Image: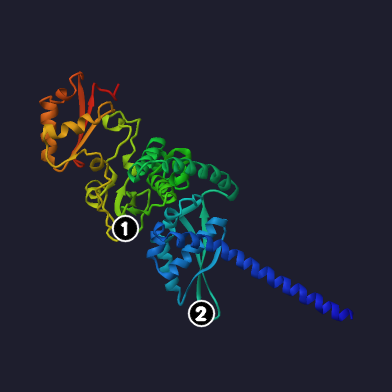
């Protein structure tokens, strides 16, 4: 009888153990499926995931899950038939996949997008496996505390953005909030501090300091929460380094059309003494086309998987009727009057010739005083590359 009871007891323990094992596996699966569920609910918000291979998608999900749970090692993240195949995949991770997950999931701001340790193992069947040791910018306890601040800031911005009356006003609010509440972190850039929070959305939104990756991730995080399709593009796609002569900016889909946004280059350094750098909000890179972006940016990455950004409706100058094909005093006068009381007047033209015609007529010939007879003086700035004219009346924003 005792033997029988012992057998029964052992059987029960084994069964319970099996249930525990299956339950743990199920819990792991649920953790991974949380990310997959988010992607499946709105796939357009995850352009990187959509364009990669099925094997890369498995790795993508495992990396995201590991980052969520601060896993120290991911064993067997990729299987190959040879060591060279594994090495080729490590190159894929290095070139874009490992890094761009940070841009696609800016809420995982503790994930270090530039550092991981790979290792290769082989079993008795000559199957090769890749193991990854991820790197994190902060420990789990610290990141959890920081995440509370981060999520509160995101919610604050998103809740106000949702009150805006239309797409343009919503995107403009997000753009202006980031530009107005963040400064470029020259120390992080100059010192090559790739462990600084300034490389991600937390640094931008909570600390108010960022480099280009931080601006891009912050814009990505907020626009994604608002339901917009958004992604990034790099000036040097293969072997990109934020501390080389590289740069990163966003593209975003607004009401069916794609646009580029560069919040880093729209932000102005208040410590610079030039008039150019005293603008409160600068919108030269707000909802621009690929052709407009190419005029001022570094060499674009031809193989970067971004859509054709050719939308024009929501461009800042187009939307506010500040862009002109040709210069004519009576034609531009309403646009100038519409900006009365603002810190500067801004106009854009389709050609350099028309820009110079506006400068000559409005400023050299001083017709600006016909529009604002009470003004005593003016200063102005011309951007030749962007074909823009900025007029400051009475040194308004300089004094």
- Corner quadrant of residue 91: bottom left
Asked whether residue 381 is in view, the answer is no
Please identify the quarter of the rendering in which residue 88 is found: bottom left
Instruction: Say which quadrant the C terminus sits in.
Output: top left
**Residue 306, labelled with which disc?**
1
The residue positioned 36% from the left and 55% from the top of the image is: 240
Residue 201 drawn above or below residue 87: above
Mark 1 lies on a secondary structure that is loop
Q: Are there few (<14), some (14-19), or many (20+) residues within 10 Å of tag 2? A: few
Q: Quadrant of residue 89?
A: bottom left
Viewer-closest of 320 and 367: 320
State which quarter of the image contains the N terminus.
bottom right
Horizontal side, residue 177 vs residue 155: left or right: left
On the picture, is 149 further left or further right than 360? right
Q: Which mark is residue 212?
A: none
Q: Which mark is residue 126?
A: 2
Question: Is residue 137 found left or right of 368 in the rendered image?
Answer: right
């Amino acid at each position: 009888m005792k033997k029988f009871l012992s057998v029964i007891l052992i059987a029960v323990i084994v069964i319970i153990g099996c249930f525990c094992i299956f339950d743990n596996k199920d819990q792991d699966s649920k953790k991974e499926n949380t990310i997959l569920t988010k992607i499946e609910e709105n796939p357009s918000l995850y352009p990187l995931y959509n364009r990669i291979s099925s094997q890369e998608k498995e790795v993508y999900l495992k990396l995201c899950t590991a980052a969520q749970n601060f896993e120290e090692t991911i064993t067997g993240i990729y299987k190959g038939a040879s060591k060279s195949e594994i090495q080729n995949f490590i190159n894929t991770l290095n070139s874009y996949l490992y890094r761009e997950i940070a841009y696609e999931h800016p809420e995982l701001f503790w994930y270090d997008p530039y550092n991981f340790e790979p290792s290769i193992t082989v079993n008795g069947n000559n199957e090769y496996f890749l193991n990854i040791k991820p790197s994190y910018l902060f420990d789990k306890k610290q990141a959890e505390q920081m995440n509370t601040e981060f999520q509160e800031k995101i919610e604050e911005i998103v809740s106000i953005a949702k009150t805006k009356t239309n797409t343009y006003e919503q995107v403009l609010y997000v753009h202006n909030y980031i530009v107005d509440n963040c400064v470029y972190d020259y120390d992080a850039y100059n010192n090559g501090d790739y462990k600084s929070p300034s490389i991600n959305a937390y640094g931008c939104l909570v600390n108010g300091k960022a480099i280009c990756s931080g601006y891009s991730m912050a814009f990505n995080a907020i626009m994604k929460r608002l339901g917009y399709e958004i992604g990034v593009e790099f000036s040097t796609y293969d072997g990109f380094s934020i501390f080389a002569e590289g740069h990163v900016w966003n593209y975003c889909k607004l009401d069916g059309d794609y646009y580029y946004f560069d919040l880093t280059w729209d932000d102005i350094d208040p410590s610079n003494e030039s008039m150019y750098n005293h603008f409160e909000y600068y919108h030269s890179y707000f909802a621009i086309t690929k052709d407009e972006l190419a005029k001022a940016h570094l060499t674009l990455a031809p193989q970067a998987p971004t859509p054709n950004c050719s939308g024009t409706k929501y461009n800042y100058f187009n939307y506010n009727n500040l862009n002109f094909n040709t210069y004519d005093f009576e034609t531009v006068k309403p646009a100038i009057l519409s900006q009365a009381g603002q810190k500067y007047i801004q106009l854009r033209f389709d050609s350099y010739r028309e820009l110079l015609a506006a400068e000559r007529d409005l400023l050299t010939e001083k017709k600006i005083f016909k529009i604002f007879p009470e003004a005593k003086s003016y200063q102005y700035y011309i951007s030749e590359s962007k074909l823009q004219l900025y007029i400051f009346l009475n040194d308004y924003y300089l004094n």
